[in-house]
Structure formats: C-alpha cells, structure tokens
Image (cartoon, helix red, strand yellow):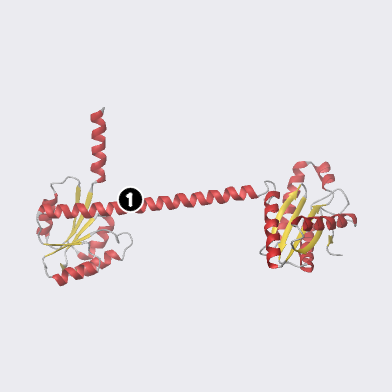
Amino acid sequence: MHANVALKMEDEDTEAESVTVLLVDDQPVIGLIVRKMLSSDANIVFHECNDAIAAIEQARACRPTVILQDLDMPGANGLDLVMAYRSIPELRNIPIIVLSSNDEPAMKKAAFAIGANDYLVKLPEPIELMARVRYHSRSYMALLQRDNAYRALHESQTKLRQSNMELQRLTNSDGLTGLANRRYFDTHIARAWTTSRQDASVLSLLMIDVDYFKLYNDTFGHLAGDDALQRVARAVQAAMVEPMSLAARFGGEEFAVVLPLIGADEACVVAERVRRSVEALNIPHPSVAGVGVTVSIGVATMTATAATRSTDLIAAADARLYCAKYDGRNRVVGAD
C-alpha cells in the first residue's frame, strides 16, 4: 500500500514537472543537437520549428512552457519575433531563451530589453541548457498556477457577492409582491428622516390602501386576492419615476411610497399617477358595477426636526388616507 502511494506521488511530481519546449531555429542540425541534449529527460516534450513565419502559430498550437529562439533567421528578425510573442495574450508570459551565436553585449542587451528571459550562446553545455529550461519552465508554471488561483479566487468572491446581494434582496423584499418589505421600509424611512434633518430637506410619504379588499377576497378567494395585490404592486412600482423613491408593502393590502426631496404638490402628482395606474388595470371588483379595483392614497410632507420623528410623517399620511377612504375612496388626499 505504501509503495502504491509513493508511486502515485512520484507520478504526480513527474506530471507537475513536465516541460514543453519549442525550438525556433532555421538550422535542422541545431534542432537535432538540442533534441539530443534534452532527450535524457523523459518529461521534456520537444517541438521544433524551422520557419520563423510559422513560429507564432506553432507556439499557439503546442503551448510551450519554454521557447528557445534563434535571432538570425531567413525572412524574419529574431528580435521582432520575440516582440511578436509578447504582443499575443496567450503567449505573452511564456519564457523565451535566446539561443544565438552572437555573443556581443549589445545584442544581449537588446534581447533582454524587448522581453527575452535568458540568453545562451550556441551551443551551451547540455547540463546548462537543461538547467535553464527547467528553471524557466518551473517559473512559468508557477505563474500560471498563481494566475489560476487568483482567477478562481476572483470568481469565488464574485459568486459570494452575488449570493450576498441575492440574500439581501430576499431579506428586504416582500415575498408576494416583490416590493420592499415592512422591515426594509422602516429602515429606509428612518435613514431618509435623518437625511432630511441634516439637510433641512423635504420628505414626502404616500400611504396607499386597496379599496374594499376584504370584499374582493371574500368574493373571489385569497389566490385571486394575491394576484390582485401583485398587479397593484407592479402598477405602483411602474408609476415611480423619481430616482430616489422607494415603494414598499406596508402590510396586508396597504402600500407605502417614500419620496425624498419631493414637496407636497409634486407628491400629490405622484400619488395621482399611482391612483390612475391602478384604476387603469381594470381588475373586476364586486363592490360597484363597472368599477375595477381602486386605491385610496394619503399624502404627507415634512421636513425633519429634532422635535419630530419619522412616525409623525407616517401618522400624518395615514390620517389623510383615512380621509380619502371616508370621502368616498379612489382618491388622493394631501395637505389641507
């Protein structure tokens, strides 16, 4: 059993240390020599390209972990080829070892300046070539593993953020209508009230109630009642064009709309738009022949002070909602 584990670990190490070499050199004899130099290591896969023009496509095809690049080739400048590798995203980070007969410092400096990782004068000792190839390949594979780890971490973080956002949406949303729920409404209006007090800005609130909804439920059943509430909620949401507005289900058949920076007159215009949107749904209602489901709306506007609370705004809007229902329903009641 221990022998099997050892063999498995050895196989994994061998796979991790595998190297793919692409030699780009127009001299076939150089290819034969380099192949022989590297042949002592069975984990090195060797590819050869004698045509500089085809080098890019071959590199794309075999995906080397190291490129051995000649500088003096017919039809192409080796330095230009190095720059070409560096301009292609999938080849950009592959280590390039220049393999040249030119030993001039200026040439070496030019090669390093355009992105070569190493420079060997033809032909190095086999042990040196093997060591350089192994070192650069290992560095490249470590870079790939790091990038893959970063990518996996980024994807994991993105999924986590999306999950958290969805959880927050579900936590803040009413399960039936999809509008903000009462908990989020309370948090939002408290925050808006604080802003109103700090900025001395107006804050308006619409309290909306579906008229004769108990009769609707008693006549058509609760499933039909749920469907009607969903349609009303969509109409309320669709009527909101103010960028900072919040529509919420306050409870039962009652809805609320928070309107920061909206004065009394404009808030009444918004409320009337909501009332008409619901009326236009033409949801049949048994209360009055020919009249569908309607809503009554109370509108209140305040500027927060140290002596007032957000519940004062809610109470004022609720009182006007009561007046709208007392006055015959399907209407908007704002400031006196």
Q: What element carries label 1?
A: helix
Image vertical order of residue 7 relative to residue 168, above or below: above
For the N terminus, give its image quadrant. Answer: top left
What residue is at 14 percent from the left and 70 percent from the top?
105
Question: Can residue 226 be seen at all in this image of the molecule?
Answer: yes
Q: Which amino acid does label 1 sit on?
A: Gln
Whether residue 179 is visible to the viewer of this picture, yes or no, is no
Q: In which quarter of the image is residue 73?
A: bottom left
Residue pushed farthest right? 327
Image x and y of residue 274, in percent: 76, 60
The residue shown at (11%, 52%) is: 127
On-image quarter of the C terminus = bottom right
Left/right placement of residue 131 relative to residue 256 reads left
The answer to whether residue 69 is left or right of residue 320 is left
Determine which residue is flagged by label 1.
Answer: 145
x and y percentages locating residue 79 in the rendered image: 21, 69
Tally of numbered tags: 1
* Image vertical order of residue 12 relative to residue 276, above or below: above
Give the quadrant of residue 29. Answer: bottom left
Q: Which residue is drawn at 23% across and 69% down?
A: 113
Q: Which residue lies furthest to the bottom in this view?
A: 106
Q: Where is residue 2 in the image (x, y as percent from the top left)?
A: 25, 29
Give the image quarter of residue 33.
Answer: bottom left
View extreme (front): residue: 306
Residue 45 in picture, x, y percent from top left? 20, 49
Q: In this view, does 251 lie above or below 118?
A: above
> Which is more toward the observer, 272 or 314?
314
Q: 55 or 81, which lies in front?
A: 81
Residue closest to the eye, 2 or 300: 300
